[in-house]
Image (cartoon, rainbow, N blue to C red):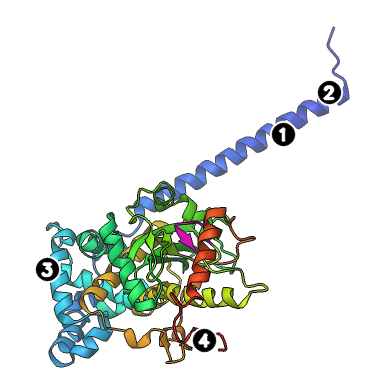
Amino acid sequence: MALVVPQRQRLGYLRMQLRRVHRERDYLIAALFLEEQRLARRQRKRRTMWVKPWLLRRVTLGHDDNLMQELMRESRGDFKAFLRMEPAMFQEMLARVAPRITKSDGARPPLAPGLKLAITLRFLATGDSYHSLAFSFRVAHNTISLFVPEVCVAISEEYRDEVFVTPSTPDGWNEVAQVFGRRWNFPHACGAIDGKHIKIKKPSKSGSVYFNYQGFFSIVLMGIVDADYRFLWVHVGAEGAASDAGIYNRSSIEPDLREGRLGFPPPEPLPNDDHDVPYFFIGDDAFPLRTYLVKPFSHRNLTHDERIFNYRCSRARRVVENAFGILANRFRCLLTTLMTTPETSTKITKACVILHNLMRNRFPNLQNADLDGEQADGVIVPGAWRDAGYLADMQGALRAPRENRAGKELRIHLKHYYNSAAGSVPWQEAALNW
């Protein structure tokens, strides 16, 4: 007896067979597409040249072998404007850095270390894109992107121990504090601290971690500066979304300060006073008030004495703003958007800081005309660097960091001191009117 299959079951069976055929068709199409791609890769036209012809004319037409040599012979001032340093300084740096950036000979002759150093310094000085530098120096832009971070690291490693020294003994910090007292009338200050944003392109898959409150992506450069605008300590590479206080609290210097391991001198009386006062850094309102970190009073309902203290404190703290101004206007890559990863941007920024300290040591009066000045009555005259562009400040915290009692007591004592005959200066009353 024949088995009779219901019509509904037959339709279901046919639909199942049809779906199986469609799946097999899709598999065949995908396999055919992959095979065509594989054959296309095998049949791709073989490379006909390793270097483009216009790059081969580097020796006859590139900046390194032509313009730079002309400037070095005929106009040393223009050479300094081109690379932000004297020819002699460039030759010294080349001699010291060359062993770190020289590559061994391979299938093709490597780039000369002088060419790599010149391109890197030109990039730091201008912030030009790698493509722009490629056309000027006739070096492929992808090659430039590889050696610029390497040269920056070589500069940092070669000069770091010479020009970037954080004091670690009471005598070292006392020397810094004496200059602050003599030059800025703020004794016991061992440095001024602040943070600035360095613009970068959006890092891949970073979300809003590097997106700061001002509306762009950045890493943070936080530094402590002495009275001569030299950096004593820096922290580079923190995410732009972080606050000054957050970066400071996560830094290596905060526990050393808090636990007394930084080597500050023991508390001593201020000039013409008999009350022991600790040594400290100066910060703005973004930092916590401590006995080792002094900041101005909040700008609300200030008394006359508090305004005097704020003027004196801000006058001394201005050195860190001027140091950032000198740094950014000499190495203008920091005023552009660095089209590099946060890691590479950190290497570039560190090299700029090292070169800044090097130039301040070798040429201490260079760029001083661009700094903030003061009139005889204490009125501050903004420096030229403020008109030429400056780094975005670290602000925007939702609330000021908590102040502890000992810090408040120290600030009150300093307020009374700077309003007394022992610590006042003749122009501070007139300075409140500007």
Alpha carbon distance from label 2 to label 3: 88 Å
Residue 295, percent from left and from top = 51, 66
Numbered circle sitting on residue 131: none
| Quarter of the image where the N terminus is located | top right
Residue 303, percent from left and from top = 63, 75
Q: Residue at x 31, y 74 (%)?
A: 228
Vertical relation: 299 (above or below) 86: above
Vertical relation: 88 (above or below) 189: below
Left or right for 70, reference 271: left
The residue under label 3 is 95
Vertical relation: 62 (above or below) 178: below
Q: Secondary structure at mark 3?
A: helix
Q: Earlier in the sequence, mark 3 or mark 4?
A: 3
Q: Nearer the viewer, residue 173 or 339?
A: 173
Q: Nearer the viewer, mark 2 or mark 4?
A: 4
Q: Residue at x 16, y 89 (%)?
A: 70
Q: Earlier in the sequence, mark 1 or mark 4?
A: 1
Residue 14, percent from left and from top = 76, 29
Q: Nearer the viewer, mark 1 or mark 4?
A: 4
